[in-house]
Amino acid sequence: MRWVPTDTDIRHLDYDNIFATGDCGTLSQPKLGHIAAIQGEVAASAIAHDLDVEIPVQAYKPEVVCIMNRGVSEATLIASDTLYDGEMDFAVSGAVPYTMK
């Protein structure tokens, strides 16, 4: 399987009118819905900018967010951007992450 090569504006490297978000793009590592949502916001801002809407193209700053169930009423939330040279890295366990799931 091949992925669509994209830059940090989520734009195809050879065709500037094609955008690829989520699992089909090369920047989605790991393949998570949360990263696809971030990429969608970046792509939308780039498209708006191309249409002369006076907004800046949003910077691509991915982060990993995962919530894992741990039984009947508990879960663990992990959030990190350290894979992408960021500084956020934490985990929270209990009822609140379970409710967020």
Image: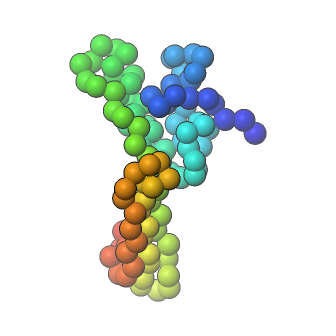
Does residue 84 appear left or right of residue 30 in this picture? left
From what the image shows, is residue 72 above or below residue 25? below
* x then y, percent, for residue 59: 36, 34
Tell me if I can see residue 24 in this picture: yes
Q: Residue at x 32, y 76 (%)?
A: 96
* x then y, percent, for residue 70: 50, 82
Residue lying farthest left?
Answer: 54
- Residue toward you, 89 or 51: 89
Q: Residue at x 37, y 82 (%)?
A: 94
- Residue toward you, 101 or 62: 62
* x then y, percent, for residue 36: 49, 44
Residue lying farthest top?
Answer: 52
Residue lying farthest right?
Answer: 1
From what the image shows, is residue 101 above or below residue 53? below
Does residue 50 appear left or right of residue 56 in this picture? right
From what the image shows, is residue 81 above or below residue 101? above
- Residue toward you, 88 or 29: 88
Q: Residue at x 45, y 39 (%)?
A: 39
Tell me if I can see residue 19 in this picture: no
Residue 5, quarter of picture = top right
Does residue 19 appear left or right of residue 56 in this picture? right
Q: Quadrant of the N terminus?
A: top right
- Residue toward you, 98 or 29: 29
Q: Quadrant of the C terminus?
A: bottom left
* x then y, percent, for residue 50: 37, 16
Its colouring scheme is rainbow
